[in-house]
Image (cartoon, rainbow, N blue to C red):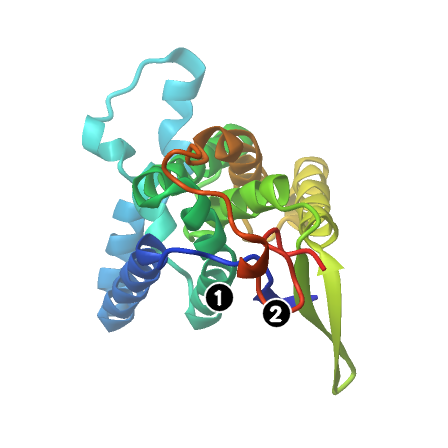
Amino acid sequence: MIPIRNAVPSRYPPVITWMLIAANCVVFVFQDSLSPSELVLFVRRFALIPALYSDFLTSGETDLAAGDFLPFFTMMFLHGGWLHLILNMWTLWLFGPSIEDRLGHGRYLAFYLVCGLAASLAHVLFNPVSIVPALGASGAIAGILGCFMRLFPLARIVVIVPILFIPLFLEVHAFVFIGLWFLLQLFQSTMGLLLPSSSGDVAWWAHVGGFLAGFTLGPLLIRSRQRYRVYYPDEGMLGFDTEGRI
């Protein structure tokens, strides 16, 4: 299922979501401009390589400087290709504004970065000896999906289900679409532990960690009613109420 529309209305412009998308695109264009040797050095410096932190995880002691932990954050602004970037940015564009609207710009940015950090930590904890660089915003975006599912479980999401060459348009509840997505991540993560060769190059545990962080933390950061008035009944999108329901 490919999501194409979110029925939850937003009252304020999603400035931070726009900035995050722009930052990811700018970084990717810079990546794409590097020579192969320069790109290797760039990825080694700013992508997340779990094996570098194995000593710190096991003994708490390390020779790493504070700057060597920067990849826990910088990895969420790197991508492995155009398709990787487009899919992540489309999901962020689709679900991010609703969460930013309810949390406020500052809290939303902090929430996004914390979810990305949780995703990085989960990836390192479950892949402590991996030397494969992990990169991508999907862990932080998984946190947005987790928060969306928690705040708007019955909201309608319009999805496309391709049947051969015929697109089938459906409306599904958020808890169905996002819940199935999360179960797939959990299944793939478990399979990666049992059969490491089946995990490929996807950081499944990063998705799980980011999702759980967003599901847990998001509702704690919602704006108070003094700072964000309740919607009037007629402020929903055409055919949907203010929670994205019919």
Left or right of residue 228, residue 243 in this image: right
Q: Secondary structure at mark 1?
A: helix
Q: Secondary structure at mark 2?
A: loop
For the C terminus, give its image quadrant.
bottom right
- Other-residue count near label 2 (Cα within 10 Å), few / some / many at <14 / 14–19 / ≥20: few
Q: Judge whether 82 appears above or below 135 on screen.
A: below
Residue 41 appears left or right of 221: left
> x, y percentage for residue 227?
36, 37
> Relative to residue 232, is residue 34 depicted above or below?
below
- What is the x, y in percent for residue 168? 76, 78
Q: Does the rendering let one see residue 215?
A: yes
Provide the residue designation for mark 1. Answer: 90
Residue located beneath label 2 in the image: 238
Q: CA–CA distance between discs 2 and 1?
A: 22 Å
Judge from the rendering whether residue 34 lies leftward or rightward of residue 218; answer left or right: left
Q: Residue at x 43, y 65 (%)?
A: 85
Mark 2 / mark 1, whichever is N-terminal: 1
Hey, what amino acid is under mark 2? Leu
Location of residue 13 (image quadrant) = bottom left
Report the mark closest to the observer, 2 or 1: 2
> At 24% across and 21% down in the image, what residue appears?
63
User: Which quadrant, please, contains the N terminus?
Assistant: bottom right
Q: Residue at (56%, 40%) from the top-left corner? A: 211
10 Å crowding of disc 1: few (<14), some (14-19), many (20+): some
